[in-house]
Image (tube, rainbow, N blue to C red):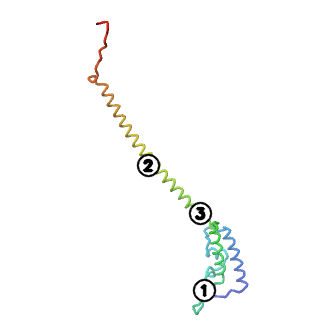
Amino acid sequence: MARLTDDVKAQNEEAVRAAMDRLLRGDLQNGGKLDLKTLAAEAGVPRTGFYAKKNRDGSERPGPYQHLGEEFLRRLAMLQEAGKVVDPRDAQIARLKAANQDLQERVAKRNDRIQELTNFQKKALSRLAAQHEEIISLREYLSEPRNMRTLRVHDPSKM
């Protein structure tokens, strides 16, 4: 694999910085995320340049763009801590979670209200049935003549 010349490396770093600024402003292409893979694709550099390399003796050396990858992740973390979520996917997930929570609360309140109304309905039907039975028994009681007595009216002229 060919080594990068200083000019190519400088051009690539400039492209990475420009891509980093675009991504952190929220200018993402469709399907892109705020990660090193997207940064590499936007800048047109290999993703492996953001990670440490191993020498033949087993020791590690930094990748050519590793410092830019660390800067990107640091700036992204600062924006997220400040509450400025740049990744539209993260914003959409947060919005959907909030909407889901709101809907769950609304469903729970409606279920409670339905339970209250169901209990009220049962009590009301029970009371209506008891009142209906009372009315029927009173009507039967009044319709039976043996339970009634006729009162004689006292006429003073017949005395």
Task: Name the outermost residue toward the left.
Answer: 146
Task: Name the outermost residue toward the bottom.
Answer: 57
Mark 3–mark 1 distance (CA, rounded to whole Å)? 36 Å
Instruction: Kindly indicate whether the residue at mark 3 contacts the one at mark 2 (C-beta within 8 angstroms).
Output: no
Vertical comparison of 120 with 103: above or below: above
Q: Residue at x 62, y 67 (%)?
A: 87
Q: Residue at x 42, y 43 (%)?
A: 120
Vertical comparison of 45 with 33: above or below: below
Determine which residue is flagged by label 1.
Answer: 53
SS class, disc 3: helix
Mark 2 or 3: in front is: 2
> Which mark is drawn over residue 115?
2
Please state which amino acid type lies under the numbered disc 2: Gln
Q: Quadrant of residue 153?
A: top left
Task: Locate residue 114 relative to residue 10 in the image: left or right.
Answer: left
Task: Locate residue 103 relative to residue 20 in the image: left or right.
Answer: left
> Which mark is drawn over residue 136?
none
> Which mark is drawn over residue 92?
3
Please state which amino acid type lies under the numbered disc 1: Lys
Q: Quadrant of residue 133?
A: top left
SS class, disc 2: helix
